Amino acid sequence: MNKIFYLTTPLYYVNAKPHIGHAYTNILCDTFARYRRFRGEKVFFLTGTDEHGTKIEKAAREQGKDPRQYVDEMVPQFKELWSLLDIRYDHFIRTTDEEHKTVVKNVLQQLEKAGDIYKAAYRGWYCTPCESFWTKLQLAGGLCPDCRREVQELSEENYFFKLSKYQSWLVSYIKENLEFIQPEIRRNEIISFLKEPLEDLSITRPRSRLSWGIDYPTSKEHVVYVWFDALVNYITAAGYSVDATRFENYWPADVHAVGKDIVRQHAVYWPIMLHALGLKPPKKVLAHGWWTMAGAKVSKSRGNAVDPAELVKKYGVDAFRYFLLHEVTIGNDGAFSEDLLAERYTTDLANNLGNLWFRIASMLEKYFGGKIPVIRQSHTGDDLLEKSFRLWDDVNQAMKNYDPRTATSKIWEVITRANQFIEEKKPWVLARREKDSDDQGLEKVLATLVECVAHVGGILSPFLPETSEKILKRLQLESELTLDQESFSKRWIKEKNKIERGEALFPKLDEEKAAS
């Protein structure tokens, strides 16, 4: 059996409703998953929620709720957003799931048995928002080095995992596997971080300070540290210690997509945990940047969160997807502006792609009664047709590099060229000329344009699934595509099929609605 392509999002913390940062990660992963399925691969796409820890307990208590009641009320908000965004995940995991708790305890017992966990007193500075301990040297001006917020000095007895034991192994692994951490800037950050000695990781919290978490298997006085708990989810979903066949088919994960602020947990803690268990690390940790407004990270804690649901109501799902995928290269930060989203909607989507479809469909109706013209042997050699067929190679190369921005740019180059082709060939002039001749120029031009828009519609499937389906169905073509290079590089259109022009793919924006 071929290994299943396994990709994951991080688990999202449920102390507030989801925002644009969460949407971006899931849209990225959904696009990667759809593209792999489009190529005929079997895919397992995992997302879920992180539901334990100090912040959750604090948020629940502030609302006068039990933590379990609180998380049960918050999780549907994430699922509803993924449904709205047409995110087709294969499994949604919660850290409160019983199977996950079982796997976490199995992992801890295995590490204890191997001698990689010990109990010790610890004094350090604790950041509640990050749920992390820091040494005095690691503090930045007395503040948390990650989030720059206040910390409190704590002294307590906890269980520790021997990160330091495996530091030299991790350094060698990263240097020998340059694709493991992407992009390069994040790999270099981790290599720089590992130049200093690693401290062992405190993997429990005293129950007297935190009661909301997974019980530590050998101590009623401790609960499992939220990050240790959450990272294990990736092997829980793959069946570790509970389903050997499933685990063999799924692990190692092909891609962990994460925000750049949690690379350390995924590229230091996690591979060491796996190595200590005798397991392979994930093939790739892919770290994307932040979305910013006025130079500040968009986040719930900063109070500048952008609501994806509101944007979808105004612009539609595909316009929102297009903006996030096309606006930044993975790894870089993106500056969010609704004005820019509206501009992309109007120029790239409505005026370029939407107008292309409208012009082609209208000319088919006017000159051929809405039917696709007869395809003749002479209808070959056009640069537009060649560019359309070459989209497979161009998009495939970009997606191999996890680069949807380049992929969508290549598609829009063809869309732009198709609009230019119409202006150059002037079908309306050819139509007048052919009234008194046997010239087949109009048939050739329209057949070429229909073929082009069909291939554009097909290759858009992972990126703009709703738009792709509309185009293909209006051409009476199969909308659930599984393709390879050979099948993509052939003609798809069926002559004499009657097309449906339909409503505008991207209706003109209601200016008052868009500005509200």
Image (tube, helix red, strand yellow):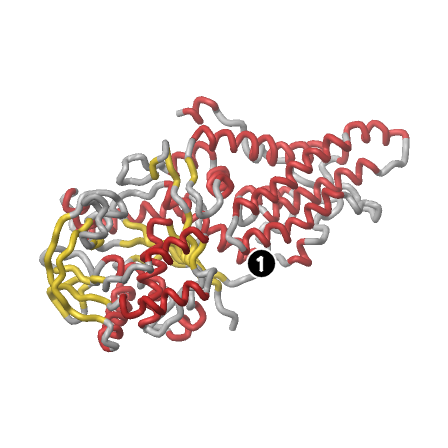
Q: Image check: 475 left or right of 20?
A: right
Q: Is residue 278 above or below residue 494?
A: below
Where is residue 343? Give x, y as percent. 51, 29
Image coords of residue 383 (percent x, y): 74, 43
Specify few, some or many for label 1: CA neighbours under 10 Å numbering under 14, 14-19, or 20 or more.
Answer: some
Q: Quadrant of residue 243?
A: bottom left
- Residue at x 25%, y 47% (from the top left corner): 145
Q: Secondary structure at mark 1?
A: loop
Residue closest to the eye, 4 or 328: 328
Q: Amino acid at mark 1?
A: Arg
Answer above or below: position of 427 versus 209: above
Q: Nearer the viewer, residue 142 or 354?
A: 142
- Residue shown at 33% from the left, 52% from the top: 262
Q: Residue at x 54, y 30 (%)?
A: 346
Q: Evaluate whether residue 469 shows in this view.
A: no
Residue at far right of view: 437
Residue 459 horizontal/vertical position (percent): 60, 48
Question: In screen coordinates, is 414 left or right of 99?
Answer: right
The residue singled out by tag 1 in the image is 39
How far from the left and from the top, in percent, is residue 178? 46, 61
Which residue appears at 53% of the width and 44% of the height? Answer: 405
